[in-house]
Each structure stands twice: as structure tokens, then as C-alpha cells.
Amino acid sequence: MTLQAIKYNKGKLEILDQLLLPTQSVYRDILSVEDGWKAINSMQVRGAPAIAIVGALSLAVEMYPKIYEDKQELEKDVEEKLNRLVKARPTAVNMKIATHQITSLAKELAYNDLINLEEMKAKILGSIEEMLEKDVSDNKSIGLIGADAIIKQKNCNNGSARILTHCNTGSLATAGYGTALGVIRALHESNHLEHVYCTETRPYMQGARLTAYELVHDRLPSTLVCDSAVAALLQHEQITAVVVGADRVAANGDTANKIGTYQIAVVAKHHGVPFYVASPLSSVDLSIPSGEHIPIEERSDKEITHVLDKRIAAPGISCWNPAFDITPASLITGIITEHGMLDPLELEEKVSKFKCLQKEIEITKI
Ligand SMILES: CSC[C@@H](O)[C@@H](O)C(=O)COP(=O)(O)O
């Protein structure tokens, strides 16, 4: 059985509470946008694509039973609620991009005299509900494209890859299958995965708690390592490639991802190991020219000073706890998108073409 972080059916939404994993699997009902905001902000649901999907679906849950006076009221409601959701976590861009897509659609429908209120509501709900399926199919494309590139690398021993990944990018961080973990799954499905190493991902431990859980659940040959073991691993264990996810990719290819990603990229460069970012277009933010403009979420000191509510750090020490860092494009071998492997240098041009095309397709659907 595949892991399902998000369960949705026509106005009913449940999420797997990731604060309780890996010891308990408990699903929570999301009954409103406020519930969605809280689940994202408290990290019951996390991972850039999953944040956007749960946020948008929490709006769908509210919209289903609601009776709107007119199209303008519906448009205003959609815009206000989505803008609130964008603020739940600042670094991942997917909620902001989803908000832009859905509010633009709502605006177009509101001014289209051929569409009535009921049709407008149905079309907005349809576009939100499509996100679930699209995310899984995009991840499957990312998986195939990434796996194919890795198998063709000169250092891929008889087509057998040894991969290092960081944080959690799997079924729990997306609608299913995963981004970087999707590449690893695709390698495994085609019998090209010799081994995968995942980092603990201090201080929140997404690697130890979530990625390790997914790898064991899916029976992939895998090993957990401390974040501080990465340099030694690349020195001794013949790693074929590093594959990580993204919370936001800037127009020049600089990539925000879980704290610790940047130092892995530096070490990979030192050892000549290809370093890939697996990112759907929904994580690419062309409005941001480079990584230095990406807002980085800072989280509570307690994530560093405590383990399971017990203080382990010396009392009185001050802490700095950024949740993400920026990997410069110069350290990235390729960005694996659902439309192909992109060189960070060609990202802006290619992605704007794909996004224009997507927009045209959406307009023809109205
Ligand atoms: C596929 S999401 C990108 C990930 O690599 C990652 O940084 C992530 O899972 C997000 O972090 P989180 O703080 O757990 O929400």
C-alpha cells in the first residue's frame, strides 16, 4: 500500500499528522481554511508541494457548502482566504504560485458574462482538485527524467546507482510518489538503484523520521546517516549522485531547500559528484531574480536545544535556526522538472515558455 499524506474526496479533506510519525499514523480532518493554515504552520503537513495542495483543498472544503450572493463575493472570498494561507510558511513558494493561479482564474471568471455563479464555483473547485492528480503525474515524470540522466552518467557502475538525499521529498511532502524521492523510486522500479543514503536532517529530523519511514515502508535498500557524515560518505562510499528537492528555485537557478543542502552541494562539488535538484515548475519562482531575495524561515530555538521535550543544550546558549539555505546555481548540475532536465542557466527562458503554454491551456478550458 502506498503512503498517502493527503486524502481528499469532494469537499472532505484529511491529512496524515506528520508530527506523530513515525510512531503513530493518525489522520486529522481539515474542515476549514483556518484548520489548513494551522496544519501547515504547525507542520502537521509539510513539504513545499503538499503545503500548497492542502492549503488550496482547505479552501475547497469551505467552498463546497457555502452559498455565495454573487460572483464578486466568491472572487473576494477566494482571494482573501488564499492570501492568508500564503503566510503560513514563508520559504516554500508553491502556495504563492497556487494562489496566483487560482485568483487569476477567479478574476477571469468573475468578469466573464458567459459564466454564471454556479459555473464559476464549479470551475474554481475543479482547478483546485486537479492539483492533486497533476502533482503525482508531474512527480512521476520528474522520476523518469532524473533516473534516466543518472543511469547515463559515466560514474554509474553498470547502471547501478548509489544516491544520497536530504530532508523528505517523498509521498509525505507531495501528493504522492515524491520529487527527489520520486527519482529514487524510479531508479528502484527499473532495477537501477543499488542503495540510497538519507541524512537525518537536523534539527527537525525529516530524514530520520519521514524519509527513513518511507524507504523502509517501500523496502528500498537504504541507510540513514548523520548530517555530519556526508563528507565522509562521499569520500568513501562511491556515491553516484546527490538528489534533493526544492522549496523555491529563483530565476537564476539558485535554490532554497532544507538547511544543510548547501553544505552537501559544496562537498559534492569537491568530490566531483553530480548534484541534482528535483523541482516541479510549481516550485520555480521567476519573480525572484536570485537566491538572496528568497525569504528564509527561522524557527524556534527549541528545535535545537531539546530532544523530545527534554533540554539537551547548555542553558543560556543562544541559537540560530534557519530552516532553509540557498544553494547557488553554480553548484547545481541540473534541475529536474516535469518538462525535462534543465541547466540552471537556461531555467528562466525555458520555464517562462512552459508557464505561458500552461496559461494558454488553462484559458482554453474556461
Ligand atoms: C519536496 S519539498 C522540498 C524538501 O526538500 C524540503 O526542503 C521540505 O520537505 C520542506 O521542508 P519542511 O520544513 O519540512 O516543510
Image (cartoon, grey):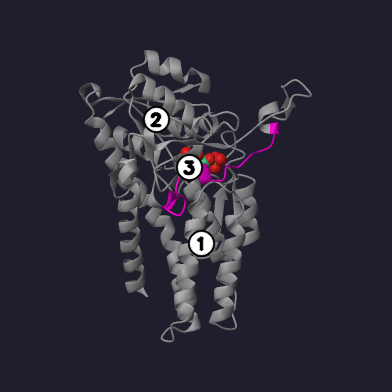
**SS class, disc 3:** helix
Residue 277 makes an appearance in the image? yes
**Distance of label 1 from label 3 (alpha carbons):** 21 Å
Residue 242: mark: none
In the picture, the quarter occupied by the C terminus is: bottom left
Q: Nearer the viewer, mark 3 or mark 2?
A: 3
Q: Which residues are magenta?
A: 282-302
**Is the residue marked 3 within 8 Å of ligand 1, measured from its CB?**
no
Residue 99: mark: 1
- Residue 245, how many percent across, how many down? 43, 39
**Distance of label 3 from label 2 (alpha carbons):** 36 Å
* Residue drawn at 36 percent across, 19 percent down: 271
Q: Is residue 236 left or right of residue 73?
A: left
Q: Is residue 10 above or below residue 299?
A: below
* Residue drawn at 47 percent across, 57 percent down: 97
Q: Quadrant of residue 246?
A: top left
Residue 219: mark: 2
Q: Which residue is mark 3?
A: 291
